[in-house]
Image (cartoon, helix red, strand yellow):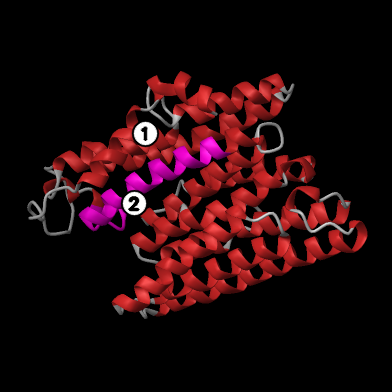
């Protein structure tokens, strides 16, 4: 890809995200979402592979439909109330449409079908952007309008996302698809608590982005795409593979790793809101996700030779592990002891 084209798309991504997260007017928020969508499409389709082109088209169609619903929702609200402010969404139809539109943008069940396919057709770097940066503007809109959302619909979609994200990840062999279903499952956790404690949703999103970035950057360094190659990637970078195992277990939410903190706080908050049944169900559903994270961790670290793989072993890569991976890997594993300080700042 031309360096200038890459620079323009990167700056457009930054601009679109900044416009959406800093706006109070629905039209400005919608404009930011559109800039983001148009900026990421060249990055998805840059390999010119048929699967990448298919992913770009699917992404464009879904995001265009979701943006139309956002615009439709805000227009109906403005028609009835005269308000274009993000925090003044009061019309019931508008609230329902907005919940649906943001669910499409994020990939919540039942609007999740596009997300694993798009991630599978993208490179690891683009998949990282789709899983983290591209989720930030819709999460911000959810945060700003959290008091207006439909609680029954959102809780139903959240539990369904946690269930489907865990269930569909069980039989996958492609790592990008596994991480896509992991993202759907985590979005379920974020959505269920947004009405009761929006700041906790943001904290969960930040920590999820941190852990996902660690996993994607490690996989990008070792050039690992599927389970059969993750078994022999330990010969390239043994230390990175050990770190990958810890990052995956952190994503699963095992104590004493960072990923335990948001799940613990969400279950605590749901219990305080007398939603004990929902807390129990979503905690049980996270065990499905735990299975495929453990399987990834097992393949990455414990399956050492002699093993029967048909792939040629590769020896150590020449370049040293760069500093950003070391920093975010440390944060994605070791933040739990700092939880009192994090909670005070939140």
307 lies above or below 53? above
Left or right side of 83 for 116:
left
Earlier sequence position, callout 2 versus callout 1: 2
Q: Which mark is residue 249?
A: 1
- Mark 1 lies on a secondary structure that is helix
The overriding secondary structure of the stretch rendered in magenta is helix
Please name the residue shown 72% across and 47% down the image: 145
Q: Please say whether residue 107 is visible from this viewpoint.
A: no
Closer to the camera in the image, 10 or 190 = 10
- Tell whether 224 sits left or right of 253: left
Residue hosting label 2:
216
Camera-near label (2 vs 1) is 2
* Residue 215: in magenta span: yes
Q: How many marks?
A: 2
Distance between mark 2 and mark 1 Cα atoms: 14 Å
Stretch of the chain drawn in magenta: 202-229
């Amino acid at each position: 890809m031309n360096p200038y084209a890459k620079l323009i798309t990167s700056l457009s991504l930054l601009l679109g995200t900044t416009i959406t997260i800093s706006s109070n007017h629905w039209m400005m928020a919608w404009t930011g979402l559109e800039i983001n969508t148009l900026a990421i499409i060249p990055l998805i389709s840059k390999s010119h592979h048929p699967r990448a082109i298919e992913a770009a088209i699917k992404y464009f169609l879904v995001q265009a439909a979701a943006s139309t619903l956002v615009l439709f929702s805000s227009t109906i609200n403005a028609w009835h109330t005269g308000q274009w402010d993000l925090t003044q969404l009061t019309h019931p139809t508008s609230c329902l449409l907005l919940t649906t539109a943001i669910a499409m943008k994020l990939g919540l069940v039942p609007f999740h079908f596009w997300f694993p396919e798009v991630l599978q057709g993208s490179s690891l770097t683009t998949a990282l952007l789709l899983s983290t940066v591209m989720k930030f503007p819709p999460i911000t809109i959810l945060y700003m309008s959290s008091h207006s959302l439909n609680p029954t619909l959102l809780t139903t979609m959240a539990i369904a996302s946690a269930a489907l994200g865990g269930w569909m990840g069980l039989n996958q062999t492609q790592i990008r698809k596994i991480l896509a279903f992991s993202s759907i499952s985590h979005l379920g956790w974020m959505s269920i608590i947004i009405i009761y404690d929006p700041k906790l949703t943001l904290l969960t999103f930040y920590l999820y982005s941190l852990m996902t970035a660690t996993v994607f950057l490690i996989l990008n360094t070792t050039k690992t795409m599927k389970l059969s190659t993750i078994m022999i990637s330990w010969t390239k970078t043994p230390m990175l593979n050990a770190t990958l195992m810890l990052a995956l277990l952190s994503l699963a939410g095992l104590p004493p790793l960072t990923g335990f903190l948001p799940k613990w706080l969400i279950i605590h908050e749901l219990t305080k809101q007398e939603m004990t049944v929902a807390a129990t169900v979503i905690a049980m559903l996270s065990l499905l996700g735990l299975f495929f994270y453990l399987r990834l961790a097992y393949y990455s670290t414990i399956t050492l030779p002699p093993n029967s793989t048909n792939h040629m072993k590769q020896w150590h890569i020449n370049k040293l592990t760069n500093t950003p991976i070391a920093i975010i890997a440390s944060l994605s594993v070791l933040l739990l002891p700092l939880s009192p300080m994090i909670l005070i700042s939140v």
